[in-house]
Amino acid sequence: MSADRTDISIVLCGEAGQGIQTVENVLVRLLKRSGFHVFATKEYMSRIRGGVNSTVIRAGGERVRAYSERIDLLLPLGRGGLRHLARRISAETVLAGEPEHLEGDVPGARLEVPLKRLAAEAGSKAPVNMAALGVAAGLLALEGEVVARVIRETFSGKDQAQVEANVVAAAKGAEAGRNLVRGGFFRPPPFRAVNDVSEEIVLSGAEAVGLGALAGGCDFLSSYPMSPSTGVMTFLAGRAKDFGVVVEQAEDEISAVNMALGAWYAGGRAMVTTSGGGFALMVEGLSLAGMLESPLVIHVGQRPGPATGLPTRTEQADLEFVLRAGHGEFPRVILAPGTLEEGFDLTRRAFDTADRYQIPVFILSDQYFMDSLYNLPPFDVAGGPPERRFVRTAKDYRRYALTPDGVSPRGIPGFGEGLVSVDSDEHDEEGHITEDLKLRKVMVEKRLRKGAAAAGAAVAPRWTGPAEAKDVVVSWGSTGPIIEEALGVLGRRDAAHLHFAQVHPLHADAGALLRRARRRVCVEGNATGQFRRLLEAASGVSIEHGILKYDGLPFSVEEVAEGLGGLLDGGG
């Protein structure tokens, strides 16, 4: 391991069902409890048992928030792991595990560790994955008492005999790891713990979106499970009683979106969470929201398509679908978080924006974002409960009253004396069906004025780097932190990063910011450069280069650094 390295990259791999995710969950919290910054993400096959899955955990003395291909320590728990990860294994990689799991024509130093025997010595209930966890802890010189405490906390409420077997298996693995260090077979990382992260929290993207929904006043969620969005539903379901949220697993996505519209009509704040294939079934409901002028929050966790595609992988290929979905013309807002802070803030904002302008608002994430986790300071939830923008209706209430900005006072049934009439057909100000063609034109323009008003409140893109940069690298959504680290690796002082957390409508400053630089590069996870085209059309600025990826895996820091290094001219 290089002496100037500020983090270590640990990878565990094995079959589905071997508890790889459990080790990730415990090890991340153990490293954070030990005073390290942590980041983790995973890649997994679409199967319940078998195959090869892996998780990467980065820990260091500085914040880490991006996926790296580098492997410093690899712990394979089954056969095929080395072959699966061969492209990422280097001569500096240390491979530790059962001898039969270290077979394969790959470089790296091999450390034989009898994980099965260590687990068996801990008792019949002890799993091999806890012995592997212990080996990692021993190699990294983590304190045994802290290891035991974190395991007991993680599995609190479980069978106590099982919990203690986990503790013993981890202790035996840790001793094996420490022996490898004592024997000079492994050198611990050269960096030190930062010790100032004790008050920070560890969250995944799914949890950040879920917390943002709670902060935004969400009291109803209806969804049909579909990876990678299901994490939001399970998170809210687990906290439904504490926060007064109704979580309904609908029979299909069509029912889910219509339930959400019904909840908004009754005065609630509702969200649906889905993926591209599920959203395809919701499109008619989306158009209904446009005609009803109903608020609606839709979270779409992107994965590769078309159809079922790669259901457990990642991609940023649904932007144009979400942007153009629906028949007829009506406004919408699309938010695309790149950091967990944005996941929280933008989801919270989505509810306020939907309520304020009575339009559909999308939170557009992806599998990589949803399944990544790291430590960060607690979110700022100042401001009190969200404002619910419905009015007490008078007898002469008109649901679609014409206003300068197109936003009509929104009433809800039973709150006041007025009749709250809504209709999927074209309608007059009172909500009655009409075929008055002049009024039709007036109502279309009314709805579009809401979009113009919402555009005036768009989230500004974030410029990082010199104001007069020669080159600017553009990102949206989850690619943002990866580009930040890649530019740091390159050490470019003449390049800047422009990150878009709102991709539609774009902020008015987008064009001016793009024109700051002489050359522009857009990095995105799809095959056709969807955001690049959207940005060029909206700003009138040419984006000279694009770096694209669409194999189902996220961009790595190394890939982006290599791609940018070949495009950006001049010195560092």
Image (cartoon, grey):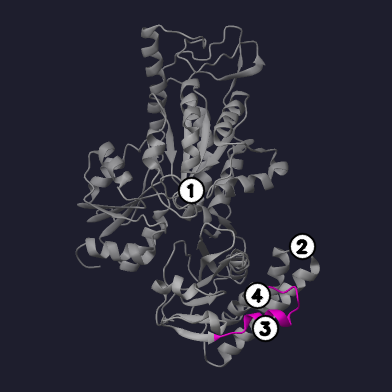
> Where is residue 555 drawn, in percent x and y?
38, 60
Measuring 69% from the left and 69% from the top, which residue is drawn there? 151
- Foreground disc of the pair 1, 4: 4
Quick one: SS at disc 3?
A: helix
- For the C terminus, the quadrant is bottom left
Corner quadrant of residue 391: top right
Q: Amino acid at mark 3?
A: Arg
- Give the Cα distance between marks 4 and 2: 18 Å
Percent x, y of residue 447: 42, 21
Position of residue 424 relative to residue 79, above or below, is above
Query: Vertically, is 240 above or below 160?
Result: above
Q: Earlier in the sequence, mark 2 or mark 1?
A: 2
Residue 108: x %, y % from top left = 43, 83
Q: Which residue is mark 1?
A: 342
Q: Earlier in the sequence, mark 4 or mark 2?
A: 4
Q: Nearer the viewer, residue 283 or 430?
A: 283
Which numbered tag is attached to residue 128? 4
Which amino acid does the dot numbered 1 rest on? Answer: Glu
Q: Which residue is mark 2?
A: 158
Residue beneath disc 3: 117
Q: Is residue 51 left or right of residue 547?
A: right
Total marks shown come to: 4
* Residue contact between numbered discs 2 and 3, judged by CB atoms under 8 Å: no
